[in-house]
Amino acid sequence: MSEPLLNIQGMNAGYGPVPVLFDLTLSVMPGEIVAMVGSNGAGKTTLLRAISRIIPAQGTLRFNGEDLAPLPPEAAFTRGLVQVPEGRQLFPRMTVEENLLMGAHLRRDKGVEASFEQVYTLFPKLKERRRQLAGNMSGGEQQMCAMGRALMANPKLLMIDEMSLGLAPVIVDQLLAILNDIRAEGIPVLLVEQDVFAAFSVADRAYVMETGRVVREGPVSELQNDQSVIDAYLGAAH
Amino acid sequence: MVLAQILLNGVLLGGLYGLMALGMALVWGVLNIVNLSHGALIMLGGYVTYYLFTLAGIDPFVALPIAMVIMFCFGFALQWGVLNLIVRSKMLNTLLITFGLQVVLTFTAQLLFTADFRTINPTYAGNNFPVGGLTVSVVRLAAFLVAIALASILWFVLNRLPLGRAIRATAQNLTAARLYGVNPRVLYAVTFGIGTALAGAAGGLYGMISNLTPYIGASLTAKSFVIAIIGGLSNPFYVIFGGIFVGIAESLTALYIGPTYTDVISFGLLVVVLVVRPSRAVRAA
Ligand SMILES: Nc1ncnc2c1ncn2[C@@H]1O[C@H](COP(=O)(O)OP(=O)(O)OP(=O)(O)O)[C@@H](O)[C@H]1O
Ligand SMILES: [Mg+2]
């Protein structure tokens, strides 16, 4: 078995004196789509903040064989650890194109043009709207823009927080399909979701988080049939 | 003809006013700091230019970019060492600190430069030329053109260069900017440095048109504040227009009401703006 791309062990993190994550262990292998599901306030966003080094954390945090713990957030970013934050967090008074450029603003390689091509191929809408202010777009378009901006950073791991939030089911399905395309281009995805159905429909493996602890983990094919997961998250509809 | 001349003077002076406000608007929009020491930085830039001219014998318009570099470094260090400590704190704290800074700078200037009036007086200071019956002062025209040029450069930096894009992005969404690799500490220091360099240029030009004393800071801060509110914080050219507007208003006041009332007018305008567009005053970026 190959080395995990992202390897977290025994992570504790929180805000000042308030602990949120407890002894958390998680890994993402190359080529995988991994889902992290859990209800409101479970600590999913906190986990992504800790991975991006925005908030301090204790425990092992290794990416691509490198210890991230001593690095500042911008170093984690330039290593290819890129997130699409909860609530899109676009630059609202900048155009779509400028938002995409902000994804690439630290890149010095020659691949930026190619990344534009890649993003515009995955999201043709963004190409149509490239001169429009990001703040004036619909929720679905904004999510595409946020994902496009992340891809412009040439990520080695794409972390997406609540991709489906507030979006119509057809848009969510489109975006889920695009996650498969992204994976096909060699970029693994860590998908943080409250919508367990959506997450399980694309993920290979999943973790279930409750109040800052991982309570279940495994291949989606197993979790889908796990009675406690069904009762808590998938409900009667499944 | 008198009116036309007055308007022309107002426009030319207004360009300089706009330049004074440019750095304040930039810092306000990006760092959310209403920098009460901005006028003192203008004053400092004036003295730097003055001494480059009198001691080093450098033509003041050549000295201007040198003064800007010096002021950039000063502003960068100030933000890095002092203001970064309070940048995300409450507005009241930033007002207090920058007010304190204004006092310190004023009295340091008094110690170093004395309270004497200084004017940057190159040989061509009094030169005029006629245009269609109007008289154009060479220095005032040059000051106006420098202001327009610097506003254009700032516009270009903000809208066309990666650094400017990062500055605007940080102003619009700090969380996202940090996630995308912007180091706010560095970016804020650079932004404050640019604002200080612009203040420095404004000070140098001010010293060619008017008198420098260590005490001009407070009233220049107030004027810059008014213009920043009128012009908004998002577009350098709007700030220049705001300056021209105030310049014209002052000139007309001097003509029709009396020269002693010119300082009142900018505050009258402030009140009008606050009544008509109150959101302007509290809006960031
Ligand atoms: N900036 C903050 N300061 C202090 N506590 C915070 C902060 N952000 C989140 N928390 C707390 O941390 C806990 C986990 O929040 P987090 O946002 O990580 O949850 P989440 O799983 O992402 O929830 P959601 O599904 O609603 O997005 C919550 O109890 C929340 O109140
Ligand atoms: Mg969340």
Image (cartoon, rainbow, N blue to C red):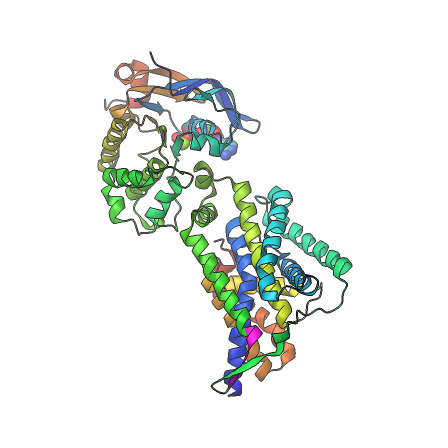
Number of numbered discs = 0
Instruction: Depth check: give the residue in front, A70 or A226.
Output: A70
Which residue is the extreme one toward the top? A1
Where does residue B279 sit, x and y in percent of width and height? 48, 59
Residue at the image position 48 percent from the left and 64 percent from the top: B149
In the image shown, does A36 or A227 lie closer to the viewer? Answer: A36
- Is residue B33 rendered to the left or right of residue A63? right
A6 lies above or below B203: above
- Picture coordinates of residue B64, whole percent (x, y): 59, 61
Residue B101 on image: x %, y %: 68, 53
Q: Is residue A114 above or below residue B95?
A: above
Residue B137 colored in magenta in the image: yes
User: Residue A71 vs residue A132: left or right?
Assistant: right
Snapshot quadrant of residue A108: top left
Query: Could you tell whether B43 is left or right of A205 in the image?
Result: right
Residue B234 in view: no
Please give left or right for residue B119 compared with residue A160 in the image: right
Find the residue positioned furthest to the front: B57
Work out whether residue B210 or residue B17 is closer to the camera in this orientation and state it: B210
The residue sitting at 39% across, 43% down in the picture is A102
Q: Nearer the viewer, residue A82 or A229?
A: A82
Horizontal and vertical percent position of residue B227: 53, 65
User: Does the magenta-highlighted stretch encompass residue B104?
Assistant: no
Residue range highlighted in magenta = B134-140
Q: Is residue B18 visible?
A: yes
